[in-house]
């Protein structure tokens, strides 16, 4: 038995699959570890070691408990549709309105079994909420009194307004101090032999670039903030705006920013155990020309670059990031992102959309000790000879196919990756000011770095962690103003 299959069956899952019957499925369910009181504790592995873990069955019997729970959920929604929007008969079929939109679906109750045109029935080929709604409508026509539909209340999450207000009103002062600590971690590269002016310190250049992106200002308008930073001692020498432009175009600048992104996520090492992946585009100042087939003309659209990242689902901290061209596929970036995150974080769950659907991606997640919640693409089961992928693929596919509600409950955490992109774009802009491709890549990475520092600041107030990257110039929470 292969190493990853042992991990799948012994440590994470126990499953016995026989065609369409899943008898037992088990997951190691671990509670989130306690929040570290200091950043030093966050780096200690024993903080994670004290997590209370318990083994709880996810699927005991497909034809028993899980199936009943799934049917009850759809039946409850069908009852709500029958009571609120009231389906109507059209000759031999029923027209059932959508519960959330303006669409309608056709239900044929005379078919064996009953059919529906909704996506849920197309995916699972079993009774959906629209079929239940039509059945309830038939019972109501027969004079039967329908039961009262249970109102489904969506969970809400209260905001810690006092802590949030403190983090926002103090953010800029904390940002400057934490950024200074992070930049001191950047080592100065060796200067090439030859004549010329001495190069500006890399730590100063990274600091000046981040201040420019954080303020969402042009380089010239940002000059006042750079002069103030030099006066306060955050810069060792005065940096001019044109110097920032020049160094942002250097390819050697990129690995330093990526390393600082990783370092900025470490204070939340003891908090994040579930992660999500996604990608999004950032538009540039360049244009690409498209030929519009429909209207027979040409259009100029903004070009863009693509940002791939892995983020924690609790605080939206970015743990690893890659940048690609606009048409790059998402799946090849899955493995480097998860491997870089696994170097510093303990992984429990990893969620991603169908763009990352790959057997190798799921196997890489299992090898890192986490459970992959990646949905299968349409027709995956119908591909020629899917059995060549082995028992591991077969068991993962059965869990996704026959335990949809349990799978979706975990997969829904993937939406936090979209929330992370929204936070970055809303705070620092979705457009890049750089003129060259390398400057645009570095600017996009700096947006992520600034986002991470802001997340750490908010976590300091709401979760009580301390951020101290270099052991001096310590940033700690105080009740008085800074």
Image (tube, grey):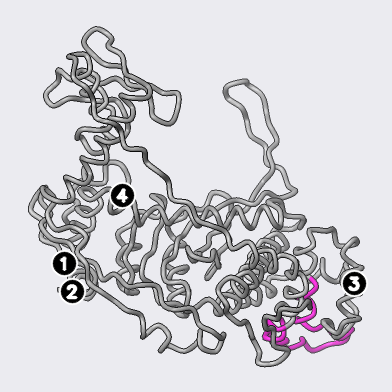
Of the two numbered discs 3 and 4 on the same chain, state the one appearing first in sequence. Answer: 3
Of the two numbered discs 2 and 4 on the same chain, state the one appearing first in sequence. Answer: 2
Residue 395 location (% of width, % of height):
18, 58
What main secondary structure does the magenta stretch of the protein show?
loop
Q: Which residues are magenta?
A: 181-208
Q: For this rendering, which residue is in front, 167 or 161?
A: 161
Q: Residues within 10 Å of mark 3 (few under 14, many from 20)?
A: some
Pointers 2 and 4 in contact (CB under 8 A)? Answer: no
In this picture, is 86 found above or below 119? above
Residue 36 location (% of width, % of height):
50, 82
In this picture, is 2 found above or below 103? below
Q: Is residue 345 left or right of residue 168?
A: left
Label 3 sits on residue: 240
Residue 477 location (% of width, % of height):
67, 80
- State which quarter of the image contains the N terminus: bottom left
Q: For this rendering, which residue is in front, 298 or 17?
A: 17
Label 4 sits on residue: 376
């Amino acid at each position: 038995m292969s190493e990853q299959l042992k991990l799948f069956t012994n440590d994470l899952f126990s499953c016995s699959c026989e065609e369409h019957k899943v008898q037992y499925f088990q997951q190691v369910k671990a509670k989130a570890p306690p929040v570290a009181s200091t950043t030093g504790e966050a780096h200690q592995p024993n903080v994670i070691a004290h997590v209370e873990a318990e083994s709880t069955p996810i699927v005991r019997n497909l034809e028993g408990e899980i199936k009943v729970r799934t049917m009850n959920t759809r039946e409850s929604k069908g009852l709500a549709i029958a009571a609120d929007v009231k389906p109507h008969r059209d000759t031999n079929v029923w027209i059932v309105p959508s519960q959330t939109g303006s669409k309608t679906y056709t239900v044929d109750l005379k078919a064996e079994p009953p059919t529906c045109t909704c996506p849920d029935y197309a995916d699972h080929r079993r009774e959906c909420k629209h079929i239940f709604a039509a059945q309830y409508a038939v019972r109501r026509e027969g004079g039967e009194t329908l039961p009262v539909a249970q109102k489904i209340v969506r969970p809400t999450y209260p905001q810690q307004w006092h802590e949030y207000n403190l983090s926002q009103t103090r953010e800029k002062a904390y940002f400057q101090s934490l950024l200074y600590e992070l930049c001191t971690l950047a080592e100065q590269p060796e200067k090439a032999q030859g004549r010329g002016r001495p190069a500006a310190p890399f730590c100063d250049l990274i600091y000046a670039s981040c201040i420019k992106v954080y303020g969402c200002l042009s380089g010239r308008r940002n000059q006042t903030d750079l002069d103030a930073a030099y006066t306060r001692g955050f810069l060792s020498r005065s940096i001019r705006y044109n110097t920032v432009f020049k160094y942002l175009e250097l390819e050697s600048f990129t690995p330093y920013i990526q390393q600082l992104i990783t370092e900025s996520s470490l204070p939340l090492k003891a908090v994040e155990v579930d992660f999500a992946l996604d990608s999004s585009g950032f538009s540039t100042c360049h244009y690409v020309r498209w030929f519009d087939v429909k209207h027979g003309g040409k259009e100029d659209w903004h070009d863009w670059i693509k940002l791939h990242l892995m983020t924690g689902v609790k605080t939206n901290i970015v743990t690893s990031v890659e940048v690609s061209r606009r048409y790059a596929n998402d799946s090849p970036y899955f493995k480097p992102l998860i491997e870089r995150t696994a170097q510093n974080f303990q992984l429990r769950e990893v969620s991603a959309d169908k763009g990352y659907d790959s057997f190798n991606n799921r196997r890489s997640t299992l090898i890192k000790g986490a459970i992959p919640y990646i949905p299968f693409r349409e027709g995956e089961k119908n591909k020629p000879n899917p059995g060549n992928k082995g028992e591991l693929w077969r068991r993962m596919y059965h869990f996704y196919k026959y335990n949809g509600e349990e799978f979706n409950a975990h997969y829904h955490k993937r939406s936090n990756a979209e929330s992370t992109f929204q936070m970055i774009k809303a705070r620092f802009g979705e457009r890049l000011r750089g003129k060259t491709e390398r400057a645009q890549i570095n600017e996009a990475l700096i947006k992520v770095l600034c986002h991470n520092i802001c997340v750490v600041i908010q976590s300091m107030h709401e979760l009580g962690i301390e951020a101290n990257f270099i052991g001096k110039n310590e940033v700690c929470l105080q009740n008085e103003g800074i």
